[in-house]
Image: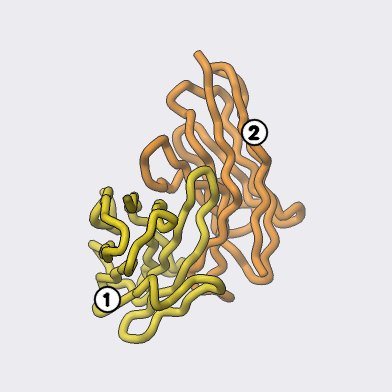
Amino acid sequence: GDSVTQMEGPVTLSEEAFLTINCTYTATGYPSLFWYVQYPGEGLQLLLKATKADDKGSNKGFEATYRKETTSFHLEKGSVQVSDSAVYFCALSDRVTNAGKSTFGDGTTLTVKP
Amino acid sequence: GAVVSQHPSWVICKSGTSVKIECRSLDFQATTMFWYRQFPKQSLMLMATSNEGSKATYEQGVEKDKFLINHASLTLSTLTVTSAHPEDSSFYICSARDGSTSGNTIYFGEGSWLTVV
């Protein structure tokens, strides 16, 4: 079945540091890939997505590129802020084989210190 | 703005009682909705797939008699936790599939925090 493997956390960075959170996936069909963010005490928010190979999703300074050859969708940000502290989930959704079910990674907790 | 709304956002109930959580698609018709559960510091796990006008499909290990799902209309699915116990305390979140878009876009609700005391 489909699976998502995320870089283990927690990750602690200083403000303005570079962020990378690794994500790799296994899917039998043609998945769309997502990064979601969950701030403390809140629900899930879509951060960015990519629907096909070589697409780059971007939002709020975060980027991730859909790499089919390495089955990866790593999240990056050039300069993190304290307000970026949250849990980040990588996820996939296969339109063909599971019609919208989402498979999530275990989440990576990011803490940014001033 | 939000296109999938969940209600209530927070609920506290007594052990042994039942609680209902609603998931509404606001701007589209959702023939399929999904219910997930997230325990503290864990990932989201799919509980069931809710199909409009038919029975929900439950994932392995999820008790269908305990977690009743009803998808009576194209914009509303409900999850009822029956005879709730403290171990049911969790974050429940739904998603809905907008089949009208070419990419079958998935939207998540804001989630509902359930505490059973």
Q: CA distance from mark 1 to mark 2?
A: 40 Å
Rendered image: mark on residue A33: none
Q: Residue furthest top?
A: A114
Q: Residue at x 31, y 68 (%)?
A: B80
Q: Chain of mark 1?
A: B
In the displayed structure image, the side of residue B113 where residue A103 appears, left or right: right
Residue at horizontal 67%, vertical 39%? A8
Q: Colour of chain A?
A: orange
Residue B1 rendering spot, x and y as whole percentages? 26, 48
Q: Which amino acid, mark 2? A: Thr
Q: Residue B110, how many percent across, how many down?
A: 33, 51
- The residue under the point 48% across, 34% down is A86
Q: Write the residue at 68% across / 56% down.
A: A25
Above or below, A8 against B50 in this view is: above
Label 1: state its secondary structure.
Answer: loop
**Marker disc for residue B74:** 1
Residue at mark 2: chain: A
**Label 1 sits on what residue type?**
Leu
Q: Is A97 rendered above or below residue A110?
A: below
Question: Regarding mark 2 in the picture, which secondary structure is present there?
Answer: strand
Q: Read off the residue under disc 2.
A: A20
Q: Is residue A29 visible?
A: yes
Between residue B51 and residue A73, name the one nearer to us.
B51
Dot 1 and dot 2 residues touching (CB under 8 Å): no
Horizontal relation, residue B98 to residue B9: left or right: right
Which of the 4 image quadrants contains residue B49?
Answer: bottom left
Shade representing chain B: yellow
Which of B6/B90 is in front? B90
The spot of residue A7 in percent (x, y) is: 68, 41
